[in-house]
Image: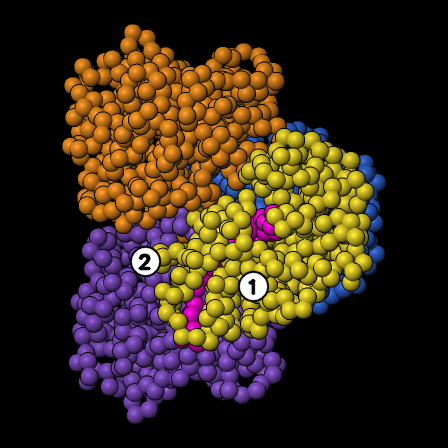
Chain colours: A purple, B yellow, C blue, D orange
Amino acid sequence: MARIEVGILGATGMVGQQFIALLANHPWFKVTWLGASQRSEGKAYAEATAWRLAAALPEDVSKMVVETAAPGNAPKVMFSGLDSSVAGDIEKAFAGAGHLVISNSKNYRMDSTVPLMIPEINGDHLKLLDRQQSERGWKGRIVTNPNCSVIALTLALAPLRQFGLRTAMVTTLQAISGAGYPGVASWDILGNVIPFIDGEEDKFQPETQKILGRVVNGAIEGHPVVVSATATRVPVRDGHTVSTSVQLEQKVTPDAIIDAFNCFRGRPQELQLPSAPPQPVVYLADRNRPQPALDVNRGGGMTVSVGRLRACPVLDYKFVALGHNTIRGAAGAAILNAELMREEGLL
Amino acid sequence: MARIEVGILGATGMVGQQFIALLANHPWFKVTWLGASQRSEGKAYAEATAWRLAAALPEDVSKMVVETAAPGNAPKVMFSGLDSSVAGDIEKAFAGAGHLVISNSKNYRMDSTVPLMIPEINGDHLKLLDRQQSERGWKGRIVTNPNCSVIALTLALAPLRQFGLRTAMVTTLQAISGAGYPGVASWDILGNVIPFIDGEEDKFQPETQKILGRVVNGAIEGHPVVVSATATRVPVRDGHTVSTSVQLEQKVTPDAIIDAFNCFRGRPQELQLPSAPPQPVVYLADRNRPQPALDVNRGGGMTVSVGRLRACPVLDYKFVALGHNTIRGAAGAAILNAELMREEGLL
Amino acid sequence: MARIEVGILGATGMVGQQFIALLANHPWFKVTWLGASQRSEGKAYAEATAWRLAAALPEDVSKMVVETAAPGNAPKVMFSGLDSSVAGDIEKAFAGAGHLVISNSKNYRMDSTVPLMIPEINGDHLKLLDRQQSERGWKGRIVTNPNCSVIALTLALAPLRQFGLRTAMVTTLQAISGAGYPGVASWDILGNVIPFIDGEEDKFQPETQKILGRVVNGAIEGHPVVVSATATRVPVRDGHTVSTSVQLEQKVTPDAIIDAFNCFRGRPQELQLPSAPPQPVVYLADRNRPQPALDVNRGGGMTVSVGRLRACPVLDYKFVALGHNTIRGAAGAAILNAELMREEGLL
Amino acid sequence: MARIEVGILGATGMVGQQFIALLANHPWFKVTWLGASQRSEGKAYAEATAWRLAAALPEDVSKMVVETAAPGNAPKVMFSGLDSSVAGDIEKAFAGAGHLVISNSKNYRMDSTVPLMIPEINGDHLKLLDRQQSERGWKGRIVTNPNCSVIALTLALAPLRQFGLRTAMVTTLQAISGAGYPGVASWDILGNVIPFIDGEEDKFQPETQKILGRVVNGAIEGHPVVVSATATRVPVRDGHTVSTSVQLEQKVTPDAIIDAFNCFRGRPQELQLPSAPPQPVVYLADRNRPQPALDVNRGGGMTVSVGRLRACPVLDYKFVALGHNTIRGAAGAAILNAELMREEGLL
C-alpha cells in the first residue's frame, strides 16, 4: 500500500522535529514536504536546522529542501507545528487552498467549527467539520489538538466524567521542551522553578470544557467542569506533571477510580491505530510515581501515567498525572488525529 | 555583653551545619558544644563531617570536639537539628535534664504542651510552657518550629486570617536540601520530579491549624482552616515553592490581600530581633516571581516571597509562596524562636 | 534453540538492573537466577529493589525470588554487577565452584590470568584463560570488562595504535549513574561539578595498557601508552565524556584519523554478535558533538561517539569521546564478552 | 570623599547587571549613566531589562533612564560589558571621545597598545597606555581584562612562572552565565555537556602569553608558555572549572607549588584595593575541591580556588582551578582594573 504523502509546517522547530522523528517509520504516512520560515527556504533540511532530538534524523528527510510555509506544491495532508505568532495566517492559507491542516497550534482550537481532538475522548467532534467548510469558506479543513498540559490533564479527567466531574484544581510542573527552541534560557531554569508560563493557565478551562463536551446540533456543548490552573516550569527535559484535585458528584471508591483510569479506552484502541497506546491511561500503584525520568515514554510517549490517588480534604480526590508533552502533548497527538481521520475516510 | 552559650544537637547534619553557619556571628548566641551520633564522638568537627555549605565553616567550630548527643556538660540552651528517628528520645533526655531544647524536629510539634512557633504569628504560644513542665515532668523545656514547607505556607496564610481563611489547597515544589544529607539520590532527582515526600503531606493541616490557633485556657484551640497538600520534590538546591489556592469568608480585593501580605509584622519586627527580616512576607509584583534562584535569600533567607495573586475559579484566590527551607524553614526558624524567648525572659 | 540460562550477581544494583533490562529480549541468554545481599534474600525481585530504569522491568523477572549471592543452584554463566567491596570473595567463590563469572567489577581486572576484555579490541585475550584454571585452582573462570570511563577512552584509542600511540591526557566528565545507587547525593552534584572520583584516575593507565596489550607466551605484554587522567563528576544522568589529547609517533592527517575511527571494526562486528553495534566508533562531524543528551544511545548505547578532532599544540591531536557508562561501560560490555565467548565455544 | 561617576556600556546584559550589583556600595565609584542598545533607550532601567541576579537591583539604578551607547553626556570612566559584536565600534567611539573605557569585551584585548590586565599579575602593563593615545589617535583610553576562563587559568599559572612554566594543557567545564543572556538554551544544556564553545579555545594561548608577558621597550614580550585548551559547557550556574596539567622546567615539590599558590600576592593586595581578595589564589587541601557550588564565592567571587595538585605522568603536575566567571572573570575583573588605575593616578 502506498503511504500518504504529508507535509510539515514549522519543520525546523521543536514540534516539527518531533513530527519528523515520529513519522520516520510510519506505516501510513510519508514526509515529502517541509515548510519553514523564509530564512530556511532553499536549504537542505540538515542545514536549515540543528537537529536536537536523540532520535536519529532520517537520512532522506535530512536532504529534503525546505520550502516557504505557503501552499503551492505541498501535499494535501499537512501537519502544523507552527509557532502561534504565524500559525493563524499560514494555516488559514493552507486550509483555504484545499489542504487538510492537522495542527498543534493554539490559534484555531477554540473556533466553533474546528475539532479540538483527543481521539480517545472525542473522535465524534469530527462532525464539526461538516459546518467548517461552509461557514469558513475554506476548500480544505483544520483539525487541532489541545495544549500539551491540557492533554495530560484531560486524558486523566475523561475517565472520571461518569462520576459527575465538577471541578479540577491543578498545578503543573512543565518540562522545558514545551517552550520550543531556544525556549527557556538555561539561566532562568537551571536549579530553579519559574512559577509562570505566559498564556498557559487561561487555556485550561476552555480547552477542557470543549474537549470533554459533546456535539449537539452540530455545535459543541461544553462540559461544565470548572478548572483552576497554576502552571510552573521546572528543570525537566520532557514530561509535564499535573498535580490534580477533583470534585465529583457521586460518592465513589478509590478502587472504582483506579479501574476507571485503567479501563479507559477509545476509538484509537478499537481501531488499533498505529500511534495508539494499548492503554491510554495507566495507573501506577507505587506511591512515588509517575515520574518524568521513569514514566514519560510509556506507550511510546502516548500513554498518560497517573498515580497517588487519595482523598482530598478540600475537594474529593487528588492524584498526579504525567504526559509526554511533545509526543502525546503535541506531534504524537496530531498524528493520532490524522490516523483516526484516515480510518474515518476523511483524508 | 557576654554571649549565651548554646549547643547543637545533630551538628553534622544539613540543619546542624546551617545552625553553625547562621550562628557564626550572632550577637547573642555562641556555639560552644556540638553533639552528634557516636560515630562522630571525640573527633574534631571538621573531621567528623564534610562541610557542605557555601558559607565558610567558622575556624573555632571546625576545631571543636564533637560529643555524643546526651546531656551532661552541654550548655543550657540547645538547638536541635536531629533526625526524627532519634530526636524523640534525645530531646526528651535533654529536656528532662533541665535543658531548653529549641527543636526543628517533628517529634514534639503536635504535643499539646509544646509551642509550635513562628514568632511573627504566635509568639504567645509560649504560654503553653507554663503547663509543659508540670504535665511532662521535665526540668527543662522543648519548643519547636514547624515543617519547612508549612512555615512558608503559614507565613503566607497568617495575613489572610483577617479575611476569614477557610481552606487552602497547595502543591509544593520542594528543594533537595529539605531531605537532609545524603538525602535524595541524584539519580532520582536530576532532570526529574518526584511527586511524593514521605510523611510530608500529612503535616500540613495539623501543623497549620496549631500554628494559626490561639491559646484558650492554656491550650491551643486550632484554627479551623482545612488544608489539602500535594508535596513534590524538584531539582532545586534551596527554596520550597508553594502553589496555593485559598477560600476566604469575606469578599476582598486583590489589593487588600497584597496590602495584607506586605504590612504583616509581628513581635520579631517590633523587638527588632537579630534574625528578624524587616518584612516577613514580601509581595512581588513581577508576574514570574517568586523564583528560588532569585528570591530565596531575601531577608537573609528569613523572608517569605509571594507572587502571582489572582482569582481562583474553584476557591477564591491563588498565589505562589516561596521560603528558604533550611533558613526560614529550619535553622533560622529555631534561632528566631530562641531570640524571642530571650526577649521574653525565657532563656 | 534453547536460550542459555544466566544468573546475575548484584541484581538489585544499578548495573544489575541494567543487565536485566538488556537481557530482557536477548536471543541467546535468559535470566533465571538473581543474587543479591542477604537483605534481599527470599523476596520477589520487585519487592527487593526499586526498579530505577526507564526501560520496563520484565514481568517474569519481577516475580523471581532473589537468592543470596552464593553458589549452589545458580546457573553456570553468571554476570556480576557486584560492588567491589564484596565482589572479590563472591566472584572467587563462584569461579571456584565451577561457574563462568563475567564480571563488571574491578577486583580481578588486573589479575594476570584474567582477561580484561573489549571484544572489538582484544578478544584474543581469552587465551589467558588457559592458565587461569591451573594457576588459580578454580574449576570455573572469571572474565572482566574495564572501568566505564576506560572503555570509552580505549575504544577511541584502539584505532590510533597503528599511528604509534604514545601518550594520552584525559579529563573526564562522568555521569552520575556511574556511581551506582544511591551513589552521589543530589546536594553534591545538582548545578555542580565534583572534580574527584575516588579510585578512578588510577585505573586509566594500567587498564588501558592491559586492554591494548598483546598476549605473548600466555601473558599480557602491556601497551606502552602513558595515560594521565583527571576524573570529574557532572550533573548528567548517563554518558561519560572524555576530553582527550594524544601523542602519536607518526605524522598523520586529521582525515586519516577520522577514517581510522570510522573504519574500526572487530570480532563482534565480524560475528554479528547480538549486542555488537554495526560501527563501534562513530566520528561526528558537527563541531559541538558528541553530547550525552543526543548521542549516548547510539548503537543501542554500545557505540562510542567521537568528535572535535583538531591539532593539539602540546601533544599532537585532541578529540572528545563519549560512551554510555552503564551499557557500553558496564552491563552491555559484559554481555558482549559473553556473546563472544559463546561463539568461541567457551560457554 | 566624592565618589567617581562611572557609566556602564551594555548595562542590560549579564555582565552589565553584574557591574551594577558589584558597584552598588562601592566606596570609590558611583554608577550615574547606563548605556544599552536603542531598544532600551529612554526607558527606566527596571523596564529596559529583567533583572536576573539574586543580588538586589539598587533602587536608584532601577529608575535611571537608559541611554544609547554613544558618547555625549556619559561620565569619563566607562565600564564596558558590551557584546563583542558591537563592542569594537562603540568602545572606539568612546575612547576617541576622551573616555577611559575599562572593557570586558574581547575586541581590543590583543591590540598591542591595550593592556590585558589582571592587576595581581601585570599591573605594569599600564605602561602600554603611553603609546596608545599617540598610536591610536584616541583622546581617551581602553584597558581590558581577559576572557573569563583565561583569568581563572592565568591566576593559577602566574605563581608557577618562577618554576619555569612551559606548557599548560587544560579542559574547562564552564558555567552557563559565561554565555550571557539568553545565552545557552536550556534544552541544550540541562543534564548535558556541550563539548564546544565558539571562539573560546583560541583565546587561551595568546591571552595567557600576553598576560604573563613583560613590557620591553613599551611593548609586550609574550610569555613563551604553550597552552592547549578544550572548552566545554556544563549545567552549572556560575563558576568555570579548569582541569590543568603543566610542564615546568625546574624540579619542584608539591609543597613548593602549594606554597606558591597560597603566597601569591600582587599590587591589589599591597594597595588593599576595595575589590581585592586578601588571597588571590587559595589552595584547598580537601581532595574533592574546588567545587562551584561551594567555592565560587570565595573572596567575594574574586579568589581563584585551586585543588587536587598531584603528579602528571605526561607533563609534570596536574591540578584543578575554579574562578567565578562573571565576578573575577568579568565585571569584578574590570572593577579591579579601575581601582588599580585610580591608585596609579590614571583616572
A120 vs B15, left or right, is left
Q: Quadrant of residue A318?
A: bottom right
Q: Is residue A270 left or right of residue D85?
A: right
Which chain letter goes with mark 1? Answer: B
Picture coordinates of residue C243, whole percent (x, y): 49, 35
Tell whether position D47 is magenta: no
Numbered range of the magenta stretch = B313-340
Q: Secondary structure at mark 2?
A: loop
On whether residue B323 falls in the magenta region, the answer is yes
A52 or B232, which lies in front?
B232
Location of residue A54 in the rendering, given as x and y in whole percent from the top left corner? 44, 54
Residue C137 seen by the camera: yes
Residue under circle 2? A13
Mark 2 belongs to chain = A
In the foreground, B248 or D43: B248
The amino acid on which the numbered mark 1 sits, given as a three-letter code, is Ala
Q: Residue at x 57, y 65 (%)?
A: B212
The residue where tag 1 is placed is B231
